[in-house]
Image (tube, helix red, strand yellow):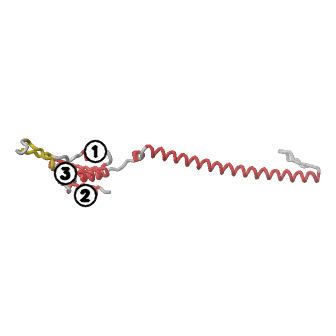
Amino acid sequence: MTVNKAVKCLQQQQSKLPIEKGNEQIWRNQTMSYLKSFFGNGSDEHKFIMGFSFGQDSESYYSEHWGRFIINKSYVGNDKQKEAYLFIDYCIETLKAKGLHKDSKKEFLNRYSDKEIIFSFLTAFIFIGGLCYTVGQITSNNKIDRLEFENQKLKDTISTMKIISDKTKVIDLPKSGSNQKK
C-alpha cells in the first residue's frame, strides 16, 4: 500500500464523522485496523484508537413529574466527534511526514509465538539429523561394498596363485622393495 492510499482510507474514515448512534464501535474497529496496518502494532496512534471511546455526553433536564433532574445519555457527544476528526488529521499529517510503517528485519521472529519457533527448530533438527543419518548409511554401505569387492578380488588372486604354484611347485614371489630378477 502507498502513503496516498493510506491517506485516502483515513480521509474516508474522517468523512464518516459525525457518527450515528450505534455505529461508533464499527467506525472505531475499522479505524483501529487501518492504523495498525499504517503505523504498526503498538504505535502511539494504534494505542490511542484502542483506548478511544466516543462515550456519551449527558443532557440533563428537570422533570416536574419526577421532581428531580433527569440525565439523558442518548447521543454521542460532539466533543468526542471533534476529537476523532482532529486525531485522523494528525494521523494523515504523520503519514505524509513519516510514511508507512515497515516491519524491521529485527522483528522477524517476533511475528511467531514461542511454540511455533520451537516446533520449527525441532522439525528442522529432526529432518537434518535424519538426512545426515541416511547419507552416512549410504556412504558406509558403499565403502563396505567396495571393501568386500576388493577382498573378493584378492581372494581370487590368491586362489589363482595357489593353482599356479601347485602346478609348478615353485613359487617365486619378489620381495617388496627389491627389483631382483632370478
Residue drawn at (76%, 52%) of the image = 149
Q: Residues within 10 Å of mark 2 (few under 14, many from 20)?
A: few
Occupied quadrant, residue 65: top left
User: Given this view, does label 2 or label 1 mark the residue nearer the observer?
Assistant: 1
Q: Nearer the viewer, residue 81 or 74?
A: 74
Q: CA distance from mark 2 to mark 1?
A: 21 Å
What is the secondary structure assignment of the residue under circle 1?
Answer: helix
In the drawing, does residue 100 fall left or right of residue 143? left
Q: Position of residue 49 (x, y in %)?
A: 25, 47
What is the secondary structure assignment of the residue under circle 2?
Answer: helix
Q: Position of residue 106 (x, y in %)?
A: 40, 45
* Residue type at numbered disc 2: Lys
Q: Position of residue 12 (x, y in %)?
A: 23, 57
In the drawing, does residue 28 fall left or right of residue 137? left
For residue 8, the mark is: 2
For residue 33, the mark is: none
Q: Earlier in the sequence, mark 2 or mark 1?
A: 2
* Residue type at numbered disc 3: Tyr
Q: Earlier in the sequence, mark 1 or mark 3?
A: 1
In the drawing, does residue 60 fall left or right of residue 179? left
Q: CA distance from mark 2 to mark 3?
A: 14 Å
Q: Earlier in the sequence, mark 2 or mark 3?
A: 2
Q: Residues within 10 Å of mark 3 (few under 14, many from 20)?
A: some
For residue 85, the mark is: 3
Q: Position of residue 151 (x, y in %)?
A: 78, 50
What is the secondary structure assignment of the residue under circle 3?
Answer: helix
Q: CA distance from mark 1 to mark 3?
A: 17 Å
Residues at badges 2 and 1 in contact (C-beta under 8 Å)?
no
Residues at badges 1 and 3 in contact (C-beta under 8 Å)?
no
Q: Which residue is mark 1?
A: 47
* Residue type at numbered disc 1: Lys
Q: Residues within 10 Å of mark 1 (few under 14, many from 20)?
A: some
